[in-house]
Image (cartoon, rainbow, N blue to C red):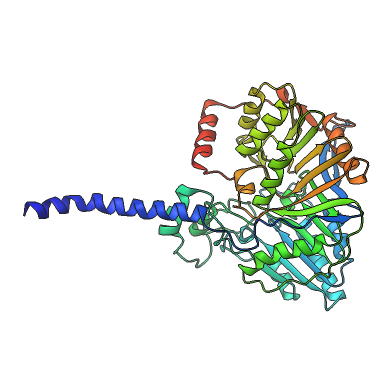
Amino acid sequence: MKIGKSLSKRKPLLSIMILAIILITIAVYQTNKDIPEGLSYEGKVHKVKDVRFLYDLTYKGKDGKQKYEHEIFDTIIKRIGEAEDFIVLDMFLFNGYYKEDMGYPEISESIGEKLIAQKKKHKDLKVVFITDEINLTYGSHKSGVFKELRDHDIKVVFTNLDPLRDSNPLYTAFWRVFLQWFGQSGEGWIPNPMAKNAPDVTLRSYFELLNLKANHRKVFVTEKTAIVASANPHDASGFHSNIAFETSGNIIGDILESEQAVLNFSGGGNLPEYTTQKDEGDIKVQVLTEGKILKHLLNELKNSGKDDHIWIGMFYLAERKVIDEIDKAADRGAKINIILDPNTNAFGNQKSGLPNIPVSEEIMEFGSENINIKWYNAGQEQYHSKLIYFDRGKNSVILGGSANFTRRNLNDLNLETNIKIEADSDREVIKDVDQYFSRIWNNEEAKFTLDYEENKDKMTPFKYIIYWIQRILWFTSY
């Protein structure tokens, strides 16, 4: 009798222990499992004659009026009109949802209409649009723009995120054990967290959103050209400042190969093939995705020192390995100029300044005279660029694309695509990037950037606590 009573008293504790073991096992597995084949892609180094630097800049002119120098999506729309064989897009955000009407450019509609028009013009043109389920708020509603594309024989593929590693160990176990099994049914009833004019969402969609992973790529290719960008064709992102690079040649085939990997685990069939050509030119280009971006970024930072000048333009900077290597490069004598978004606004919503404000304070505490930080003078828009430029005198290296310098973007969690460019410093693409940074750093013609001390959004003790909790637990959107 006493043994039976003793066991009955221990049953709740035993059950809790078993559940804890199950949750820990799932968390460890889901955050460390093998990534699908073909991800973390490191393309061949190809030589091309030309790479074109594209940018979007939003700023206030000397007259106080808002100015827009935007060329990325104008270029993409033009290239759609030149395609005859195939078009492949992989874009994270593609919708017209927003919190309030601020006169956003109708980017998603313009691109959708141009794709349909080109498909009508060339009946044999194959068009594939790869995207993220965030545009359906994870199954809560349909998308009119994607339905219209499908109605015109354009293939739309929503990325299957389940095979990807989960980014938050604590939440993933709870999600995987208790929540993911509830299916979607009926219409949503909770206000959409993405935008005021977006359809309501279900509770399950909210839970899936909190699992925090995405196909974050921004890529456009045809048989004639390739564009790797930091910009989303998303109306509410239409005023953001961004960057992109356009080139051609065999890198097109590498991008298609990296995108085929996504289709292989998303039920998307086969992409068109690109016929390999002979490399021509002296500019080196290479496609990098996911963790291979971090590999090359760290290598370039480790190889930087005296006489090198590093320029960084970044929406989010938080990856510890990158921050540590920035510090070490400065100690070796490299001059480092960093332009950051203040992280205080997202689509009309106020943000806390995380992670850039506390991270910038940490970097300034290094006390290196070789590191200087400025804030982009953003209004309701964001400085959404993801760009680093290594000026090594006679030659230079550029890394740019979709990847923020954060754990989620660089550690085989999100899907990301960047392009690496190596060229002599007298090449046009290098001179254009150099002029871009010089212009906004030195406030030529306008007040593009603010000195570090001019940012009035300081960290409160509460925000620091939140930042450190996020840093330790990895429960963060960046």
Q: Quadrant of the N terminus?
A: bottom left
Vertical placement of 283 versus 358: above or below?
below
Q: Is residue 59 above or below residue 177?
A: above
Residue 46 in the image: x percent, y percent? 83, 56
Left or right, 306 with reference to 262: right
Position in image of residue 165 (x %, y %): 54, 55
Tell which of 204 and 478 is nearer to you.
478
Q: Residue at x 50, y 66 (%)?
A: 184
Q: Which residue is pictured at 89% across the width and 46% down the height?
A: 429
The x and y percentages for residue 416 are 68, 53
Quick check: 286 above or below 146? above
Quadrant assignment for the C terminus: top right
The residue shown at (86%, 48%) is: 53
Q: Name the quadrant containing residue 457.
A: top right
- Can residue 351 be seen here? no
Asked whether 387 or 332 is in front, the reply is 332
- Residue 450 lies in quadrant: top right
Residue at position x 88%, y 42% in the image: 430
Please tell me which residue lies in front, 369 or 78: 369
* x and y, in percent, of residue 129 in the image: 72, 66
Horizontally, residue 174 falls left or right of residue 379, namely left
Comparing 362 with 445, the one in front is 362
Answer yes or no: is residue 246 visible.
yes
User: How many dots with numbers?
Assistant: 0
